Image (cartoon, grey):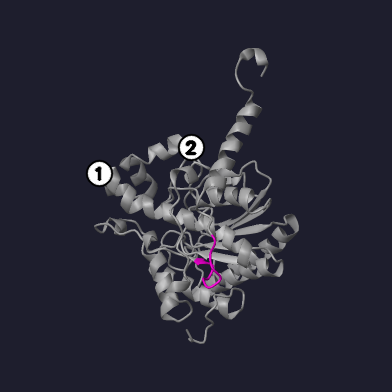
Amino acid sequence: MSSSSGGPSPISKNDDAEAVRRNRILSSKLYFDVPPSKAPLIYSSSYNIAFLGIEKLHPFDSSKWGRICQFLTADKILEKKQIVEPLEATKDDLLVVHSESYLASLKSSINVAMIVEVPPVSVLPNCLVQQKVLQPFRKQVGGTILSAKLAKERGWAINVGGGFHHCSASKGGGFCAYADISICIQFAFVRLNISRVMIIDLDAHQGNGHEIDFANDRRVYILDMYNPGIYPLDFEARRYIDQKVEVGSGTETNDYLTKLDQALKVAEHKFNPDLIVYNAGTDILDGDPLGRLKISPEGIAARDEKVFRFGRERNIPLLMLTSGGYMKSSARVIADSIINLSRKSLIDIGTGISGKI
C-alpha cells in the first residue's frame, strides 16, 4: 500500500497485532511458579459442570475430570495437596487468539447453547451461563496454558481437562468454547523459548479448531488420527493436517495401535519439535456412542504409553489434555492409564505406587 493512501500498510497492521498479542502474553498471570512438592498434574474442582441437571442433556461426562483425580487419590497414586490448581483465563488471555467479536458472541446464551450442544442453555440468563458453563471452561484453559510451562520444567505435565480442539480463534463448536490448544502454543512461543510444536491429536474426532488456527504456520506440525465419518466433517481444516491418519468406524485395538506405531515413526522423521501437545481423547473407547471405534481400556493405556515414550526417548517435553470421552467409564480408564505411565516410569508423580503417603 502506498503512503499516499493515508492508512497503515498490511505489514505494519500485522506487526501491531503481534505486538499486542505479545504484550498480553507477557503480562498474563497464568504462568506461575509451582513448588517441587507438587506434581505437574493440573486440576481444579471448578472444572466440573453441574447445574440443575442440564449437563446430563449432553453425552459428555462433565464430572469426568473430578472423578479422575478421585480415583488417583483413592488409589494412593497422588495426594490432593500435590495437585496444581490453575488460574482462570481472563479476557486478555483469551484475546491472545480470540477476537473481541467472538468473545462478545458468548454473551448470547443461544450461541453458547449451540456450541455446547445443549439447547435448554439458550433460555438461561447469560450470567448463569457464564458462571456455570463458561467459567469452568476458562479455568481449564488456564490449566492447559500452565501445563506447557510445567512440561518444559519437568519433562511432562497433564491437565486433567482441556483439549477443546473444535474451537478456533473465531468459531466454537462440539462442546468447545475456547481454543485452549492454540492459546497454549502462542504462550509457549513467547515465554518458553519454544519455536516448534507438534500436536498429536488422538481424540476420535478431527481437531479442526487448531488445524484452522495453524493452517499456515510452519512452526506447528499436526498429526491427527481420527474417524473421518463422524463430526466435524471439516474438509477445509483437513487440508491443513500435516499427517492425516484416518481410522474408520469399527477399528479395533490391534489395528489402531499398529497405525499409531507407523504414524509416530513417520512423524519422527518429518519434524523435530521443542514441545508435544498430546490431545488424548478417550472417545476411541469401545462402546463410545460418538467415537464409534472399538479400542479397549488396555488399548488406551498402550496408546498413551506409546506417545509418552515417543516424547521421553527424544527428550521432548510433553503435555497431555484429556479432551473428549462420552462414557462414564472414561474417568477410570484415564486414571488407570496415568497409573500405568507411572509404573512404567514414564512420569514421576512423586508418591510412588507402593501406597506410602
Q: How many marks?
A: 2
In the rendering, at what x and y percent does residue 141 appear? 47, 53
Magenta extent: 33-41
- Among the 4 quarters of the image, the one containing residue 51: bottom left
197 lies above or below 332: above
Q: Please tell me which residue lies in front, 36 or 7.
A: 36
> Circle 2 sits on which residue?
99
Q: Main secondary structure of the magenta part?
A: loop
Q: Which mark is residue 186?
A: none
In the rendering, at what x and y percent does residue 112 appear? 36, 45
> Circle 1 sits on which residue?
123
Residue 122 among those drawn in magenta: no
Q: Residue at x 51, y 87 (%)?
A: 354
Q: Residue at x 39, y 38 (%)?
A: 105
10 Å crowding of disc 1: few (<14), some (14-19), many (20+):
few
- Check disc 1 and give the amino acid type: Val
Q: Please tell me which residue lies in front, 311 or 224.
A: 311
Residue 35 among those drawn in magenta: yes
Q: Residue furthest right?
A: 269
- Check disc 2 and give the amino acid type: Ser
Q: Is residue 126 visible?
A: yes
Q: Nearer the viewer, mark 1 or mark 2?
A: 2
- Among the 4 quarters of the image, the one containing residue 127: top left
In the rendering, at what x and y percent does residue 287 appear? 43, 67
